[in-house]
Image (cartoon, rainbow, N blue to C red):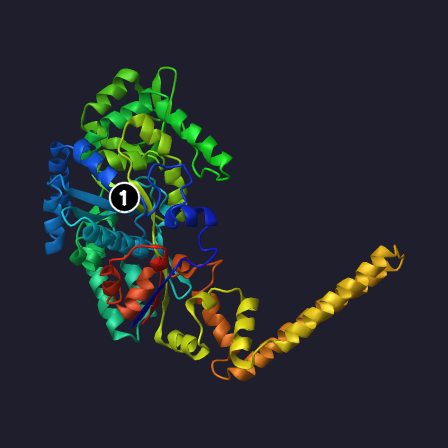
Amino acid sequence: MRIREIAYPKNYISETLRNSAWRNIPLGLYPHEGIQSDWAQIMHALERGFSVEQRKTLHQVLHRQHLGIAHEEQQVNIDRLLNQNAFVVTTGQQIHLGLGPMYVVYKIISTIVLCNQLEMQFPDKHFVPMFWMATEDHDFSEINHVDIFKERYTWNKDSEGGVGELVTDDLHDMFEWLAQKFQRNSDALLRIDQLRKIYLSPKQTLAKATAEWVSDLFGAFGLLVIDPNETALKRFAKGLFEQDLFEDSLFEAFNDQAGIMREKGIEPPALARECNVFWMGEKRQRIVKTLGGFETVDGELKWSAVDMKAVLNSDAIAHLSANVLLRPLYQQAVLPCLAYVAGPTEYIYWLQTAKAFEVGGRIVPALIHRKGGVLLNASQGKKMDKLDLSPDDLFLDESSLKDVLLRKTTGENDLVMHAQAIEQSMSAYLRVLYEWKSVELPEAKKQADAFLKAQRKVVNAAVNQHLEKLFEEPGWNGIRTVLLDAFNVESPQERKLFFIQSYLEDGAEWLLPLCKEKVYDEFSSFWVVES
């Protein structure tokens, strides 16, 4: 196995995010942006602001949620959180069936690596990686499928409530489908049986199945998995829910921040509402304010102001659920969280919360961009070696890559040079007609455009044919297929390759060296992993 670390490929993330997250050029939209954040300041605030009582409750919740699945290192970290010098580094995600695309796993590994670096930087502190499962999310269509070899299994089930509570005992056909896909791979069939035991165990839910599998994969590195849909945790968020429901301060803060973001050229991704709280029952529904109090958006459930106060002061608070903007504040109400590791879209969501954190008087974690990556199998790795291409070369657009390949094999691309000279000459020819104000200019331009279009087609075909001859096996088309599949900036592999496909094909051993890394900087922000 070979692992190469590079900076994020150009155009994978915007220059705005690159500067904010990696280059210590803050946008001024969030108190602690990127890997150069003031860690000591945040830790000091958490030591004072996150109480012993909160730590004890968190310890009890995590201990209960990890019963039966806790790795030794997980139990050590659960106990560490009782101490004021222990902090959490969190990432979160919808709980996809089969964990979802590769970027979900990269987020988890990024969180572990950041903890490794912080342990080296602050040896008298403890840093606990945590995966926050979005069990209360109700968008079932986003998580109800698994893609394998460009084919899709879809979990057909009625669901309008939080996806974490979905029972998984009807997934027998998914495992039969997987077994059919890997029928000639005995190791994959064994892994399918292991997953079958996790997902089809009695009374299993999607949340518990996800927690168990993630713990199997990353428990040895102390990663904790939390289901935030807990009554005990929501009691600590009572003040947050009350502020959102009974005041306008958070609503105004979200809107004010949205305006500031637009001034910086960033469109806020979320719509702030007067109420940013959902009601969790058989359905998860948005709560709206009325003249007399509150109701669900469909009008089925109604509360007076007195009734809602009673909800906040009872176990019924468990039915309250934060929306995408309120979720970061809920996280900070229940965790001693030092940093949140976000994907590019999440990063923008979090920028929208800065004023709300200030208005709510809550401790703001550092906002960190996750690492990314590409997986190559042995065959693909050999093709790359044969071409003597660097990782930066691999992410070039197709035309630029052809030029690189030709220069590596034959020197300058004479055909392209001459074609460019013809285009420059043609442009000069048309410019003279334009300066003469010649009536022949429209006809000349029409002929020139037709000629240049035909010439470009010929040049492209000739270059492809030449590359085919130079690389008889696998040939240019074979190389092109690999590059478009693995190194496609416009359609990144990490968003279309599902982790379960890689896991069933090759196992999880390749995760281990990544999780042991101790450097988290711009130049190690992207992995190229060759098995």
Vertical side of 91 occupied by 303: above or below: above
- Residue at the location (26% across, 16% down)? 306
Q: As displayed, is residue 303 above or below residue 190? A: above
Q: Is residue 9 left or right of residue 309?
A: right
Circle 1 crowding by C-alpha within 10 Å: few under 14, some 14–19, many from 20: many
The answer to whether residue 103 is seen in the rendering is yes
Q: Nearer the viewer, residue 528 or 70?
A: 528
Q: Residue at x 32, y 31 (%)?
A: 357
Q: Is residue 48 left or right of residue 383?
A: left
- Count of marks placed on residues: 1
Quadrant including the C terminus: bottom left
Residue 435 placement (x, y as % from top left)? 84, 56
Q: Tag 1: residue type? A: Ala
Q: Position of residue 481 (x, y in %)?
A: 48, 71
Indicate the position of residue 293 as horizontal and vertical percent values.
34, 18
SS state under label 1: strand
The image quarter in which residue 314 lies:
top left
Q: Quadrant of residue 495?
A: bottom left
Q: Is residue 390 above or below residue 467?
A: above
Question: Going by the image, does 443 lie left or right of 238?
Answer: right
Q: Residue at x 21, y 54 (%)?
A: 116
Q: Position of residue 159 (x, y in %)?
A: 33, 43
**Residue nearest the viewer, comparing 145 with 501:** 501
Q: Can I make out residue 223 in this image?
A: no
| Left or right: 331 in relation to 5 | left
Picture layout, residue 30 above or below residue 96 = above
Q: Quadrant of the N terminus?
A: bottom left
- Name the residue nearer the viewer: 11 or 280: 11
Residue under label 1: 339
| Residue at image coords 24%, 60% | 515
